[in-house]
Amino acid sequence: MSDARMPWLVLIHQLPPKPAYFRVKVWRRLQALGALAIKSSVYVLPNTDEAREDFAWMLREIRKGGGDASVAEAGFVEGLSDEAVRTSFQSAREADYRAVAAEARGVARGFPRRGGRAPSPARRAAVEAGIGRLQKRLAEIAKIDFFGAPGREAADGLVRDMENRLGAKDDAPPRRGARRLQAAEYRGRTWVTRRNVHVDRMASAWLIQRFIDPEATFAFVQSRGYQPADGELRFDMFEAEFTHDGDLCTYEVLCREFGLSDPAVRRIGEIVHDIDLKDARYGHPETPGLDHLVIGIAGERIDDAARIERAGAVFDGLHGYFRRKRDA
C-alpha cells in the first residue's frame, strides 16, 4: 500500500428493487471479497491494488444489472475510526474461524484416536470429505483475513489434527513417550509471533522466557505472507514451529514439546486454554479475572513488547500463587 493513499476503498451502491436474486448475488459477491458493510449500501476494503480490481468488477456488475455504484478512497475522521474498522474486519474473520473450528470438532466427533479401533470405511470417507471441505473454507477465509484475526491457528490445528489421525496407521503408537525437546538447544533465539498479542501469545512468551529460553528476543510481524529468516522460531501463527495442535493452544503445545510438568505451569495453561479457545473445558475460578486483565493490557496504547512485559508480571504472580497454594 502506498503511503500517499488513503487507507480504505469504499463502494457505495444503489440496487434496483427487482429482481431479488440480483441483490442476493451482489451481497454474496461482496461477502466473498471480505468487504465490510458499514451501512446498508456502503462497503469497505483495505486500499490495495487487488481490492481496486475487485471493486471495479463489482461496479461493472452492478451497473450491468441496472444499478449504480461509485468507488472512492477514504479515511475516517468522525464517527468510525480507522482502528475501529480494522477491529471490525478482525471480528468478522474471527467469527469465521470459530465456525470452522466448531465444524471441525463436529466432524472429528467419534473418530478414534491413534491406537484405538480403526474407523469404518464409511466413517473414514465422511471425515475425508469433511477435512477437504474445511481446508477449502480455511483457505477462503485466510484470503480475506486482511489484519490477522485471532482464531486461524486454532481452526487450522483442529483440521491438521484430523489429517494426522486419518493418515496414521491404525496400529501406530500414541504420541505419548515421543522425544522431548531440550530447552538448552533453543537458547538465545529470536521468537517470532503475530502483532497485537493476546492471551495465548502473552502466556507463551512468558513461558518461553521463564522455562525455555531466558535469553529469548521477540519479534512481532504481520503474519500475512511472512517468510521467516534463518534461525527464527515462530509461535502462535500459521505454519509456525509451535502453534495450535488439535484442541491444544500454543502454550499447551510448548509445555508438551518441552516436557514442562510443573503443576503451576499446567494450571496456567488450562486457564489460557479456556480463554483462548472459549470452550470452558477446565472452568477454573481464576479464568474470568485473567481474561479481564489480558483485555485491559491489550486495550492500552502500548506496543507488543510492553504488552508481553506487563503480562509477564501477571503470569509471574499467578505462577507464584499456584505454587504456594499447592505447597500449603
Image (tube, rainbow, N blue to C red):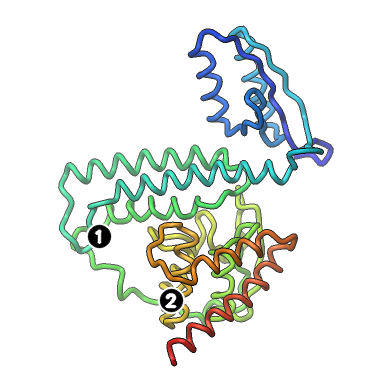
User: Callout 1 environment at 10 Å: few (<14), some (14 to 19), or many (20+)?
Assistant: some
Query: Disc 1 marks which amino acid?
Result: Arg
Tell me where residue 292 appears, x and y as whole percent.
58, 64
**Of the pair 63 and 313, the residue shown nearer to us:** 313
Q: Is residue 153 left or right of residue 195?
A: left
* Identity of the residue furthest to the right in this view: 4
The image shows residue 146, relative to residue 248, as above or below, that is above
The residue carrying mark 1 is 113
Name the spot of residue 275 as percent of width and height, x first: 49, 62
Q: CA distance from mark 2 to mark 1?
A: 23 Å
Q: Which of the two residues, 284 or 260, is positioned nearer the viewer here?
A: 284
Task: Tell me where residue 232 appears, x and y as whole percent.
Answer: 60, 66
Res 315 → quadrant: bottom right
- Residue at image point 24% right, 41% down: 126
Q: Position of residue 160 (x, y in %)?
A: 38, 53
SS of the residue under disc 2: helix
Residue 110 vs 60, above or below: the answer is: below
Q: Identify which residue, 176 or 67, lies in the foreground.
A: 67
Viewed as shown, does residue 281 lie left or right of 243? Answer: left
* SS type, badge 1: loop
Question: What residue is shown with label 2?
Answer: 266
Please give left or right for residue 110 compared with residue 61 in the image.
Answer: left
Residue type marked 2: Arg
Residue 48 visible to an observer of this rendering: yes
